[in-house]
Image: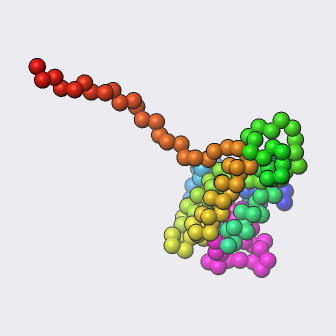
């Protein structure tokens, strides 16, 4: 793998952009949104992963199990400290000292990655019902990662409720 630009710790996507599938888009990468560029890089990364897989895999033969293998592979590039249950800082969001716990991909990053890859799969002609990124095993894995990181880091990943404007109480109708 080679670093891209001057980044000394490239993201997994940036580390493997050499793979270039045929694209149906005629828009140049510079005019795409940040989201579209990231989605393209993620798709290229996954394509490179499939090509480097032993034996090589075609997208049509890719399953949820292969997606899980890919997500576990990406963990080696993670930058989020996830404390083990034996660590004295388990459950502390801001530990006061360093520890030897592993660096992993953050749940939010994996969740966003899967969302982009789900969209890219369908944009590249895949049928929604055959989308390996939407497989039940992938959803369960993401939930497990979220829950374990939440406990290990002492951070709640509950969905934020939308704030609604305060309701002004209506006075009861007068009968006089």
Name the one closer to the observer, 68 or 168: 168
Residue 35 in view in this figure: yes
Residue 23 in view in this figure: no
Q: Residue at x 62, y 53 (%)?
A: 112
* The quadrant where residue 136 appears: bottom right
Per the rendered image, the range of residues in magenta is 43-64
* The quadrant where residue 126 appears: bottom right
Q: Residue at x 42, y 35 (%)?
A: 164
Q: Quadrant of the C terminus?
A: top left
Provide residue 170's location: percent of width, then percent of height: 27, 27
Q: Residue furthest front?
A: 175
In this picture the colour scheme is: rainbow
Provide residue 157's location: percent of width, then percent of height: 62, 47
Q: How many marks?
A: 0
Residue 48 covered by magenta stretch: yes
Q: Quadrant of the N terminus?
A: bottom right
Looking at the picture, does residue 1 appear above or below residue 93? below
Residue 26 covered by magenta stretch: no
Name the one closer to the observer, 45 or 86: 86
Q: Residue furthest left?
A: 176
- Assign the magenta stretch its main secondary structure: helix
Q: Residue at x 80, y 53 (%)?
A: 84
Name the one closer to the observer, 101 or 12: 101
Looking at the picture, does residue 120 appear above or below residue 160? below
Name the one closer to the observer, 51 or 70: 70
Provide residue 24's location: percent of width, then percent of height: 56, 65
Q: Residue at x 77, y 58 (%)?
A: 75
Looking at the picture, does residue 34 appear above or below residue 135? above
């Amino acid at each position: 793998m080679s670093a891209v630009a001057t980044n000394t710790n490239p993201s997994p996507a940036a580390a493997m952009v050499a793979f270039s599938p045929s694209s149906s888009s005629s828009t140049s990468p510079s005019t795409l949104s940040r989201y579209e560029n990231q989605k393209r890089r993620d798709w290229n990364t996954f394509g490179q992963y499939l090509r480097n897989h032993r034996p090589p895999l075609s997208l049509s033969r890719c399953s949820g199990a292969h997606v899980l293998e890919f997500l576990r592979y990406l963990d080696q590039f993670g930058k989020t400290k996830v404390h083990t249950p034996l660590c004295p800082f388990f459950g502390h969001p801001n530990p006061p000292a360093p520890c030897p716990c592993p660096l992993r991909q953050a749940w939010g990053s994996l969740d966003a990655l899967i969302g982009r890859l789900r969209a890219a799969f369908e944009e590249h002609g895949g049928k929604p019902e055959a989308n390996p990124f939407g497989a039940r095993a992938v959803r369960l894995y993401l939930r497990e990662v979220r829950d374990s990181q939440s406990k290990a880091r002492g951070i709640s990943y509950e969905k934020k409720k939308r704030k609604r404007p305060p309701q002004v109480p209506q006075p009861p109708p007068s009968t006089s």
